[in-house]
Amino acid sequence: MNRPARPARPARPTRPARPARPVRIGPRAAVALVLVTLIGIAAFGWPLLADRGSGLAHAQDAPWLFAALLPLLVAVVVATIADNGMDAKAVAMLGVLAAVGAALRPLGAGTAGLEPMFFLMVLSARVLGPGFGFVLGSVTMFASALLTGGVGPWMPFQMLAMGWFALGAGLLPGPERIRGRAELLMLAAYGFVGSFAYGTVMNLQGWVLLQGMGQGISFHPGEPVAANLARFAAYCLATSVGWDLGRAVLTVVLTLALGATLLKALRRATRKAAFDAPVSFGSVGPGPGPGPGPGPESSANPPSGGVRTAAEGDIRGLPR
């Protein structure tokens, strides 16, 4: 005897793809970022305003800058967590990306300025936001310094400069509108310009220590700021343009070659993590009794037990 065929279950409606949301910056995290930036500007620029009799060795102020920078970086992370912008998933992603960036930096070995970590900072900050990018850049530079033995008076300045570099990538316009080739070209252009900006800022840190190089490019303490800035521009053109050009070209090439794949992977991971999704816990009801499998009605209306997020819905299979 032939049994009647069961009616086909109605197809469940497919949910539209949820856009990848960056880690948002709350008011407390914004205040911490502004404070770090102001301290960094003062640390880089104070020799330009100092008189002849002041000590200009950054080796003396670097420990104080490092002592102020680390608590402020922790304050940025804590403030972001307090503003519900960063959870355990975001902290885990921060650790993974920082480890990858720290491992990429030694690959260039500093040859002709080739540093492949810069393109990763651009792409990560683009997807995960400016606040996340600033912390990622600083932590990555700190980890790479420990990995390569590059700890010295320059390290806190490198952490600040890399944090600003990634922060700028996170502030680029159109994170949800610009896609495809246009986005890659914009990121590559920023990577090119930002690589020169990073090198210029780091030159300012070391230039004030290198005196006696020549009347046209040497730093003269106590002279007008405009005159010293003109000498600084000549110093950058004479000593570091070729070095910064290698970094900029490599960043552009890696962004255009690997950017589409990495952006897609980062956005998929961000959607899965659902950093901005509120989490609510419902009561776990009794387990289903024996009997036939769930019908269309039970599939359409899942039980209220489990964890529900705005992005993922109910998560089944909790221990009962």
Image: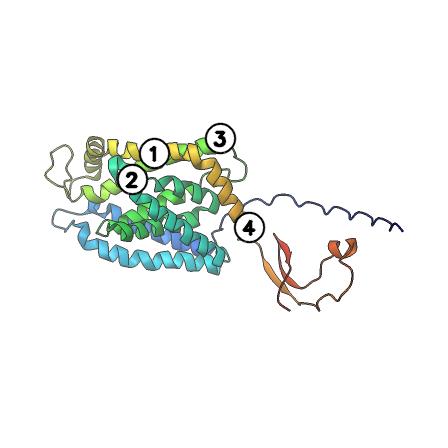
Indicate left or right for 13 with 198 as reference.
right
Residue 318 location (% of width, % of height):
62, 64
Residue 305 location (% of width, % of height):
67, 64
- Image marks 1 and 2: residues in contact by CB distance under 8 Å: yes
**Mark 1, residue position:** 250
Whether residue 201 is visible, yes or no, is: yes
- SS at mark 2 in the image: helix
Q: Quadrant of residue 191?
A: top left
User: Gap in Å between the C-alphas at discs 2 and 4?
Assistant: 33 Å
Residue 262, compared with residue 147, is above or below; it is: above
Mark 2 Cα shell of 10 Å, populated few (<14), some (14-19), many (≥20): some
**Mark 4, residue position:** 272
Q: Could you tell me which residue is drawn at 35 percent across and 57 percent down?
A: 72
Q: Disc 2 marks which amino acid?
A: Gly
Q: Earlier in the sequence, mark 2 or mark 3?
A: 2
Q: Could you tell me which residue is drawn at 28 percent across and 34 percent down?
A: 244
Q: Disc 3 marks which amino acid?
A: Ala
The mark found on residue 182 in the picture is: 3
Residue 230, compared with residue 83, is above or below; it is: above
Q: Disc 1 marks which amino acid?
A: Leu
Q: Earlier in the sequence, mark 4 or mark 1?
A: 1
**Mark 2, residue position:** 108
Q: Could you tell me which residue is drawn at 23 percent across and 42 percent down?
A: 204
Q: Disc 4 marks which amino acid?
A: Lys
